Image (cartoon, helix red, strand yellow):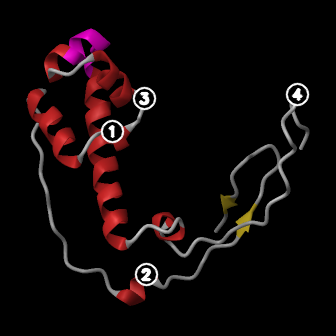
Amino acid sequence: MKSKGNEKPMPPTEPYLTKGNVLDDLGFSPEEGLEIKVKADIYRDLLHYIKNQGFTQQELGNALKIHQPDVSNLMNGRISKFSVGKLIKFAGKLNLGAEVRITNPQRVAAQKTAALPVKTIKNRKQPTVIA
């Protein structure tokens, strides 16, 4: 890879085979991973609705009763700034429903799936999983 300006060239990396859950691979506990996934699911659905409605940042700030910097954080994916509860409150302020569902524990055997081979494709930064 060629470097730009004063940047150091990136060293070649070995492909990494995930164990099946990228959050586990990143070192998050199962509890933290669950919270991150729930938060991301709520955020994705909330953002989808907001974009489909065509809110301006000012309109969204007024509807959610939040200041512009928080609107910017929300629209730019900085969801670490918001709790799961806060995102659910935002949904309520937009007259959206929310549903929380608890599922049965996952079986340990289901988590021990075989890793898929990884192939790095030219001009891509991330490895691509091939089946």
Q: Provide residue 14's location: percent of width, then percent of height.
A: 78, 66
Q: Is residue 76 above or below residue 124?
A: above
Q: Which residue is painted at 35% across and 56% down in the image?
A: 36
Q: What residue does disc 1 label?
A: 81
Please rate how many residues cluster around mark 4, counting C-alpha atoms within 10 Å: few if below 14, some from 14 to 19, many from 20.
few
> Quadrant of the rendered structure where residue 9 is?
top right
Residue 74 is inside the magenta segment: no
Q: CA distance from mark 2 to mark 1?
A: 30 Å
Q: What residue does disc 3 label?
A: 76
Q: Amino acid at mark 3?
A: Asn
Q: What residue does disc 4 label?
A: 5
Q: What is the secondary structure assignment of the residue under circle 3?
A: loop
Q: Earlier in the sequence, mark 3 or mark 4?
A: 4
Q: What secondary structure is the magenta-colored segment mainly?
A: helix
Quadrant location of the C terminus in the rendered image? bottom right
Q: Are marks 2 and 4 in contact (CB under 8 Å)?
A: no
Q: Which residue is painted at 51% across and 82% down in the image?
A: 113
Q: Amino acid at mark 1?
A: Lys
Q: What is the secondary structure assignment of the residue under circle 1?
A: helix
Please rate how many residues cluster around mark 1, counting C-alpha atoms within 10 Å: few if below 14, some from 14 to 19, many from 20.
few
Q: Provide residue 16's location: percent of width, then percent of height.
A: 69, 68
| Mark 2 or 4: the one toward you | 4
Q: Amino acid at mark 4?
A: Gly
- Magenta stretch bounds: 53-61
Q: Provide residue 101's location: percent of width, then percent of height.
A: 14, 62
Q: Is residue 108 above or below residue 82?
A: below
Q: Provide residue 83's location: percent of width, then percent of height.
A: 24, 45
Q: CA distance from mark 1 to mark 4?
A: 33 Å
